[in-house]
Every structure is written in structure tokens, then in C-alpha cells.
Image: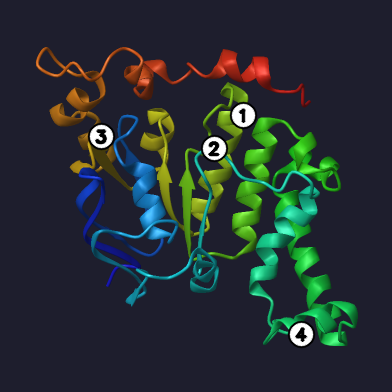
Amino acid sequence: MALLEIRNVARHFDGVRAVDNISLDVASGAFVSIIGPNGAGKTTLFNLITGTDQPTSGSITFEGQSLVGLQPDQFAGRGIARTFQHGRVFGNLSVLDNVLVGAHTRRKASRPRNMVVEFFGALFPTAAVKQEEQQLRQEAEAIIARFGERLTPRINNPASSLSYANRRRVEIARALALQPRLLLLDEPTAGMNLTETAEMLEFIRELKQQGLTIVLIEHKLSLVMELSDRVVVMDNGLKIAEGAPEAVRNDPRVIEAYLGNKQNTRFNRRDAENTERFNHRDTEDTERRQRIDD
């Protein structure tokens, strides 16, 4: 039995099939990438897996248990964590406190039974709560340390003061603080320059080597080809190809989906940014909007 099983999943919006009859298995320890042109349905599929949205039809199971109908906050307890396409951090919280938000989902000693207990527990924490809080803080600090000089010197800075790339790092650190068995990464290198992308590639490679199960959405195909055990290609909500990276790279259906042909004019040069020779397109825009963060 696969760790994650998706069977005939569809999501329709006013007649538009954003995800259309998708089936996918992700084995424990696997690294699966989902690629496709903009609007292919990749992020919608992530939303269905993690409860941000609900499928029109089909089933999604994790470790044999259905995920359909669960609320997003229930997924942490199942061992599932994700990042978002445009990055989400709590700007008014420090780097450490952002990561602690993820760590706190694993609390046991301080987990309240009702709001009254939660209120008085916050005012008068028990010894067990204090001990657990210290342990979670140490774990959060250790995760932040994995990003080296990018985050460690800024551990007490508000997330709003960070560069775009560092905010993405904080989001991944927060997801790792959940100690997930399944990590979903939605375009973790989007908007990053070449150096930042290379650093993120190495960080994700380390996660893979540690045996973490990862599903990745990414437009930079060099990264996808280097990391993935298997690649799934979506277009117009459909799965049009699946297989080993090299086989998918040379699949005529995949090339057509990205670059189009005479009969298919939906895709133009702008869409072709997703292919190998357009991997560096975001660099200049990123450097213009980022703060200097050396």
C-alpha cells in the first residue's frame, strides 16, 4: 500500500475541470515531482490533498485513512505538511516563533480539552508544559540552524524584515517543525536567483537523502530532473504523462504541453519559461525586489 493514494480525483469549478480524474500513488520515501504549464491544476491538486479544498469526486487516502472532509488543521496530526506557491509566514512574528507555530502542533502535555483549560494553562503552565515548550524551542532552533547563516543570525528578527528567499526558507522550516511523514513543496524556488536556487536544491536533496517522502511542484526542470524518482505531468487538469525523469523529458505530449504546436496556440513563449532554457527568467525581477541579504 502506498503512503499516499489518489484515486480518480476531480475538482470542478462552474463547469471548469481544474483537476480531472487524477490518480497517483506516492510510496514512503519517494520523491515525486508534479510539473506542467501555468493553470494545469497542480496547486489545486495540492489543495485537495491537504484539505484547503475538497474534491468533487474521487478518494484521497494517507496510510490507508481517508483525507477527504478533514479540516486543514487536522493534517498536521496525520503527519502531512505543505508550503504554498507564494509563501506564507507570520510577518509580525520572529523567525523562531514562526517555526514554533509548526512545532506547537505536536504538543501533548499542554494540549487543552477546552477553551477554559487553554486559558488557565497559558496563565499557569505546569512543569510538564514548561519542559515540553523548552524541548520544542530547542527543536525549532535546530531546524533553523540547518539553513546556516541565512536564518541563524536573524532568528529573533520579524519575518517581515526578511528577504523573499529567507521568508521561503522560514516557511519550509515551519513545515519541517511538524516532523511530517509527507512534505508537499509548492514551487519552493519561485522568485529565487541562481545562488538561492542552488542552495535550496542542496537543502531539498538533504531531505530526500534522509528518507522524507516529498511531493514537489516546480517549474525549474533542471531541479526536477536532478531530484525526482518519478515525474507527473499535468495539463488542463489532466495527467498527460508519468514516469522516470528522462522518459518524461522526451515525451512528445509533454513538449507539446509546454511549447504548443500549430494547432495549439494556447502556449506561447511566456509559457515556455517552464522549460530548461527559460529556467533563469525570474532572476532579474527577483533581484530588483529583494533586499540585499548577504
Q: Earlier in the sequence, mark 4 or mark 2?
A: 2
Q: Earlier in the sequence, mark 3 or mark 1?
A: 1
Q: Position of residue 105 (x, y in %)?
A: 64, 70
Q: Which mark is residue 196?
A: 1
Q: Which residue is mark 4?
A: 116
Q: Which mark is residue 246?
A: 3
Determine whether label 4 and label 3 are within 8 Å by CB: no
Q: Earlier in the sequence, mark 2 or mark 3?
A: 2
Q: How far apart in space, not on screen, are marks 3 and 1 (Cα)?
A: 25 Å
Q: Which mark is residue 86?
A: 2
Judging depth in this view, the residue of 18 and 163 nearest the camera is: 18
Q: How far apart in space, not on screen, are marks 4 and 1 (Cα)?
A: 46 Å
Which residue reaches farthest front?
Answer: 14
Q: How far apart in space, not on screen, are marks 2 and 3 (Cα)?
A: 28 Å
94 lies left or right of 247: right
The answer to whether residue 30 shows anywhere in this view is no
The residue mark sitting in front, 4 or 3, is 4
Specify few, some or many for label 3: CA neighbours under 10 Å numbering under 14, 14-19, or 20 or more.
few
Which residue reaches farthest left?
Answer: 263
Q: How far apart in space, not on screen, are marks 4 and 2 (Cα)?
A: 36 Å
Q: How far apart in space, not on screen, are marks 4 and 3 (Cα)?
A: 57 Å
Determine whether label 4 and label 2 are within 8 Å by CB: no
Q: How far apart in space, not on screen, are marks 1 and 2 (Cα)?
A: 16 Å
Determine whether label 3 and label 1 are within 8 Å by CB: no
The residue mark sitting in front, 1 or 2, is 2
Residue type beneath disc 1: Glu
Judging depth in this view, the residue of 8 and 204 nearest the camera is: 8
Q: Earlier in the sequence, mark 4 or mark 3?
A: 4
The residue mark sitting in front, 3 or 1, is 1
Q: Earlier in the sequence, mark 1 or mark 2?
A: 2
Quarter of image, res 232 = top left
